Image: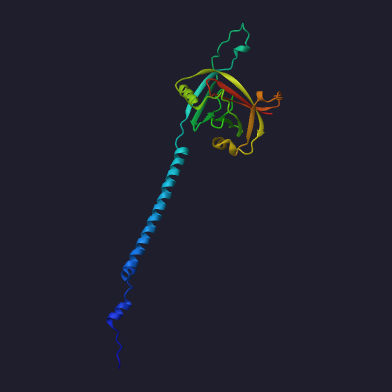
Amino acid sequence: MVKIAFNSALAHKALGKEAPLSDQDPETGSVYSAETSTGRCLLTLLGLAFIISGLIVGGACVYRYFTPKKLYHGSMQFTELDSADMPMDVEVHEPYYLPRIDEDVEIRDNVAIINVPAPRFGKGDPAYILHDFKRKLTAYLDLTLGNCFVIPLNTSVVMPPQDLLDLFLQLMSGSYKTFLVQEDLVVTERIDDISPLGYYIYNLCEGKPTYRMQRRSDIMGIQKRSVEDCFKIRHFENKFVTETKICRA
């Protein structure tokens, strides 16, 4: 009988695992390891850059949109009597109770946003009023019907942002008695694209019917008022109260 035998050294080599590449060729293995490490470092740095940029942008958004807004509250009492229309021999007495207007204002980015609630007593409709001093525009949002109205900023009535802020700081320390002036505005046309009106007016009026207005005194031929649909907003952006009457022709 013939016996077949295997060399134990050869069998051990055949059954054993293949030697790592670095053991077979130390030079090739070291180059491969260095390239892998460099690639991983680059990917890690790129990922960190994306994370940091995201944190910066996200932090700016949170700071701008989610931080508590600084609101200033003010109120004015005013008289509606016009002594110029009274006879000379009639003594004018201030009424026992004067109408009062309350407002909250937020001033930021050269924009004033005013919340005019419905008065507890007297006339007036609730509204948001936005004065964009950069674009020289004013927008009224009628909270009853949800319509927006835009008109050029009346700088002779509306105080600049810092002066308006100073006024509200004075009003927060005590009551203020003043008088009433009136302005008459007329709706002229609907605005289909409100994006050119700027970021703040766009956010205020987005999804709402928006119209352009002019002052009645600037429009020739509009005299008849009996068939007009009008509403009034009593507010203040100066040391007097303004009654803004907005009418559809």
When asked about the image quadrant of residue 183, the answer is top right
Which residue ends up furthest to the top in the rendered image? 89
Image spot of residue 52 (x, y percent)? 41, 47
Image spot of residue 213 (x, y percent)? 64, 30
Give the quadrant of the N terminus: bottom left
Q: Is residue 173 left or right of residue 117?
A: left
Closest to the observer, 35 or 15: 35
x 32%, y 77%: residue:
15
Q: Is residue 6 left or right of residue 185?
A: left
Q: Is residue 53 left or right of residue 185?
A: left
Closest to the observer, 208 or 123: 208
x 36%, y 59%: residue:
37
Q: How is the image coloured?
A: rainbow
Closest to the observer, 226 or 151: 151
Image spot of residue 197 (x, y percent)? 58, 35
Is residue 111 positioned above or below 94 on the image? Answer: below
When asked about the image quadrant of residue 206, the answer is top right
Closest to the observer, 100 or 96: 100
Give the quadrant of the C terminus: top right
When asked about the image quadrant of residue 218, the answer is top right
Q: Is residue 219 left or right of residue 233?
A: right
x 57%, y 19%: residue:
180
